[in-house]
Image (cartoon, rainbow, N blue to C red):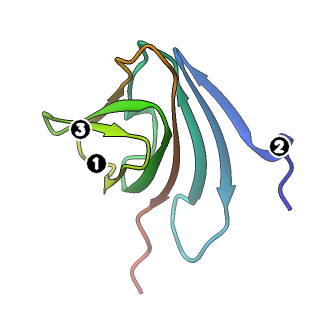
Amino acid sequence: MVARDDFVHIQRGEADFRILPLSVGNAREGVYLAEQTYASGAKISAQWMIHNGFIGGMVVQGTIELHLDGVVFTLNAGDGFNFSLNRDHTFVNRADAPCKLVCVSFGETESK
């Protein structure tokens, strides 16, 4: 059981992140489950997050643009994504309503 208060809360501009660090396998920088809410007009470059790892997620509410290496993808509720975190990426909410994502990210795994 994980209580609501056990999540780390981070506010970055017009985006709100509720993050739960998970202890899984041999990931160097950890594994994170996150609920990300982007207010209308939010533009968040993920430069402040881990860079050596991967992220995957799904839009559960609203619409968001994913700018990935100069290519723009429009993602709607039910759409998903996954990519290496060392790629240039930004999330932009151009809609009039908030957008909510659920994501899992993890650092590079150690070689055996």
**Quick one: label 1, few (<14), some, or many (20+) residues within 10 Å?**
some
Q: Is residue 56 left or right of residue 17?
A: left
Q: Position of residue 18 (x, y in %)?
A: 66, 38
Amino acid at dot 3:
Asp
Residue at the image point whose x is 44% and y is 71% from the top: 109
- Which mark is on residue 58? none
Question: Marks 3 and 1, how far apart in space?
Answer: 7 Å
Numbered disc 2: secondary structure: helix
**Quick one: label 3, few (<14), some, or many (20+) residues within 10 Å?**
some
Q: Which residue is mark 3?
A: 88
- Which mark is on residue 86? 1
Residue at the image point whose x is 38% and y is 18% from the top: 95
Q: Can you tell which quarter of the image residue 93 is in?
A: top left
Amino acid at dot 1:
Asn
Residue at the image point whose x is 85% and y is 40% from the top: 5
Rendered position, 82 above or below 25: above
Rendered position, 58 above or below 99: below
Q: Position of residue 89 (x, y in %)?
A: 28, 37
Residue at the image point whose x is 83% and y is 56% from the top: 2
Numbered disc 1: secondary structure: loop
Where, quadrant-wise, is the C terminus in this rendering?
Answer: bottom left
